[in-house]
Amino acid sequence: MRQLTSLDAQFLAMENDRVQGHVSVLGVYDAHTAAGEPLDAKFVGRIIGERLHLLPTFRWRLAQVPFDLDYPYWVDDGTFDVEYHVRELALPAPGTERQLAEQVAHIIGRQLDRSRPLWEVHVIHGLAGGGVAVLTKMHHAAVDGVSGAEVMSILLDDTTARESEPAPAITAESFPSEVQMLGRGLVGLMSQPLRMLRAGPTALPHLDDVPTVRHLPGVKTIARSSRLIKRALAAGGNRAALRGSDITAPRTRFQARVSPHRRVAFGSMSLAEVKTIKNTFGCTVNDVVLAICTAGLRNWLNKQGELPAEPLASFIPMSVRTPEQRGTFGNRVSVMLTRLPTDIADPIARLHKINEEMGPVKQRHRALPASLLQDANHFIPPALFAQAARATSRLAGVRGLNQPANVMISNVPGPSTTLYLGGARQRAQFPVSGVLDGIGINITVMSYQDQLELGIVVDRELADDPWEILDALRAGLDELCDAARATTPERKDN
């Protein structure tokens, strides 16, 4: 058995009747493989079955410790129920993108069944372009962005034909009894004071960088006092690591408690255009992505008459997974907090401001302990973990309290070559993430071939039409493209 880390367990504890803890990928494929086989649930189930020995997260079942005395464990179930996990449905005609997005929003709004391995695959037929969509839904307790991409790299190939090799036998673990789990919990209970002592020097000075608690009353005071003590005890320490975050998030409609319901929009942008902007203005692809998101949010909020005078604040998840941790799954993540200069009207000035601010933000992030999010959780006994998560969630979005951030933005590098699912060509691959209380919008970007694929998820009660936000982001790209063309002198042939 494998015990979840406190960070893994946090993605379980954060779930309630309104918040879901899974992440998804929406792939759009040709309806048939190169060999002419139809891409349906039976075919997808067979592909997964053939590669199950490479997919431990698809075999893991959750074993809870009685009375929540310690963090749960994963038990390798050895197999899965194809008919339960791989499902099939069809869109009504004409099968537009918006109809697909509505179906995806409905699927991601349902929690995964904790009595089974925490994943589902939905094969969706009836798309207007004649393709087939495959939505892969995995719990964040088992995978983060990088390990989720590893799962997809096992399911997908870079050729139309992959030689099948005899799969090694999988040794299933017997599911433990409650008495056995109670014994583990009692042993874990004795180690909790040691966890707390070890986590203190790492976590306390940086509590105001922990996204789940930084907005709570008293957190900044605790972090500031801890930094003063750390400076006194360790003169000449890393100044970037001992500097608190002074970024605050102004209130927008997204800083509220979310409902159980979601809206989704997805689309593509030209990666070549983004790189042209990057080269023209001497910045990074990530800077351009943030500038596009900043422009889109600025224009959309302004159209609603809700643009704050202060810049918005964004959480940016970052992987801290080392090369040695590849294939270990679970969560190895940290979060950067940065300003989005929505208060600046000029698109070039906005881009330069983002580029200027990201340097210190990255320096500060590198100075933070890689285990910060995990260590911060060790101050809460596992028996109180779920209750503390629910209490923190209720406070997120409460008027009068500082908010953790306005938006979550992720930019995930993806494959530059064409991928195939059992020989069926993948046309596009859209990330579909989730929202939280206090942060009711998520924008995730993933590169695939020569495109940037965008997935926008909003709470249905806070924004009814995310396609308008997607249009605003595309307008932000057009604005920067126009600025790049105006900046670059045209070449004249002799």
Image: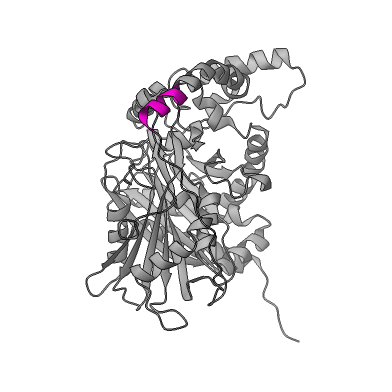
Image coordinates for residue 109, horizontal then vertical, percent: 29, 49
Query: Which of the 4 image quarters holds residue 370?
Result: top right
Q: Please state which of residues 19 and 484 is positioned toward the viewer in this rendering.
A: 19
Query: What's the residue at 53%, 32% (across, down)?
Result: 247
**Total numbered badges shown on the rendered structure:** 0
x 41%, y 69%: residue: 28
Asked if residue 224 shows in the view, the reply is: yes
> In the rendered image, is residue 399 in sight?
no
Q: Position of residue 365 (x, y in %)?
A: 63, 37
Mainly helix, strand or loop, the magenta region? helix
311 with respect to 124 (left or right): right
When the figure is inspected, residue 217 is found, relative to residue 89, above or below; the finding is above
Q: Residue 253 in the image: x percent, y percent?
A: 33, 41
Residue found farthest to the left: 92
The span shown in magenta is: 177-185
Quadrant position of the C terminus in the picture? bottom right
Which of 336/484 is in front? 336
Which residue shows up at 59% across the image and 22% down it?
Answer: 199
Whether residue 229 sits left or right of residue 343 in the image: it is right
